[in-house]
Image (tube, rainbow, N blue to C red):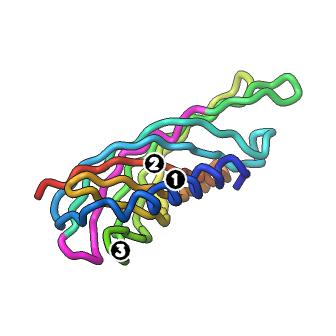
């Protein structure tokens, strides 16, 4: 993971924790949200070690217990391109995920880990040749969130693997959620 990518995740988490003492805890329930993502494509098969892009995600979930949530996300993993020895490489990916989140509350701050399944679509082109594929892979991640009543803010890291293209996709995101109480 490159330094810019790690710095974004750490600064987001520290900002959430710093704001926490002035917030109120949220009740459990159904929630919707959206966020900004930074995706990093780690691949050796396309003539470049790392390509990255900014994009977005949409979130829907339910938290029936203080320590448990179920969540679905649509994540536009971005479009990345580079030129390597006169050849242009372009990568584009999206994913729909279904995950279980295990949460640990410290006051109004939630630390969580997620595990689930991602259905991804991946398009790649190198020069004049292109290929695309879809598949299902395991996904996992960690995050920290703070709730201001029904409003939540969170920072998260999630990882995807696209085996066919020998590519790992690392995603950091800052998201806002609204819980319907």
Distance between the alpha carbons at the discs numbered 2 and 1 = 7 Å
| Camera-side mark, 2 or 1 | 1
Task: Report which residue position mark 1 lands on.
Answer: 12
Task: Report which residue position mark 2 lands on.
Answer: 174
Q: Residue at x 22, y 67 (%)?
A: 63
**Residue 135: x and y, percent?**
47, 52
What is the secondary structure assignment of the residue under circle 2? strand
**Residue 52: x and y, percent?**
65, 39
Please state which of residues 160 and 56 is positioned toward the viewer in this rendering: 56
What is the secondary structure assignment of the residue under circle 3? strand
Which quadrant: the C terminus? Answer: bottom left
Q: Residue at x 49, y 55 (%)?
A: 15
Please state which of residues 96 and 177 is positioned toward the viewer in this rendering: 177
Other residues around mark 2 within 10 Å, as few (<14) / some (14–19) / many (≥20): many
Please state which of residues 116 and 104 is positioned toward the viewer in this rendering: 104
Q: Is residue 55 left or right of residue 84?
A: left
**Tally of numbered discs:** 3
Q: Are marks 2 and 1 in contact (CB under 8 Å)?
A: yes
Q: Which mark is residue 58?
A: none
Q: Which residues are magenta?
A: 64-79
Q: Is residue 65 within the magenta segment?
A: yes
Q: Residue at x 16, y 63 (%)?
A: 29
What is the secondary structure assignment of the residue under circle 1? helix
Distance between the alpha carbons at the discs numbered 2 and 3 = 17 Å
**Residue 164: x and y, percent?**
61, 51
For residue 144, above or below residue 155 = below
Other residues around mark 3 within 10 Å, as few (<14) / some (14–19) / many (≥20): many
Q: Is residue 7 left or right of residue 92?
A: right
Q: Is residue 48 left or right of residue 39?
A: right
Task: Report which residue position mark 3 lands on.
Answer: 103
């Amino acid at each position: 993971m490159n330094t810019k990518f790690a710095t974004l995740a750490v600064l987001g988490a520290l900002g959430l924790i710093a704001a926490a003492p002035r917030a109120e805890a949220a009740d459990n329930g159904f929630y919707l949200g959206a966020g900004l993502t930074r995706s990093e494509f780690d691949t050796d098969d396309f003539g470049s070690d790392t390509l990255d892009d900014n994009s977005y995600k949409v979130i829907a979930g339910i938290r029936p217990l203080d320590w448990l949530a179920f969540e679905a996300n649509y994540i536009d993993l971005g479009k990345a391109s580079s030129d390597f020895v006169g050849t242009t490489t372009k990568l584009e990916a999206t994913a729909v995920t279904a995950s279980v989140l295990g949460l640990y509350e410290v006051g109004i701050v939630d630390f969580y880990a997620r595990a689930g399944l991602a259905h991804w679509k991946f398009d790649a082109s190198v020069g004049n040749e292109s290929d695309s594929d879809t598949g299902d892979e395991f996904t996992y991640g960690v995050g920290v969130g703070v709730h201001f009543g029904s409003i939540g803010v969170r920072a998260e890291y999630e990882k995807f693997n696209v085996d066919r293209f020998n590519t790992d996709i690392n995603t950091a995101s800052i998201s806002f959620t609204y819980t319907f109480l």
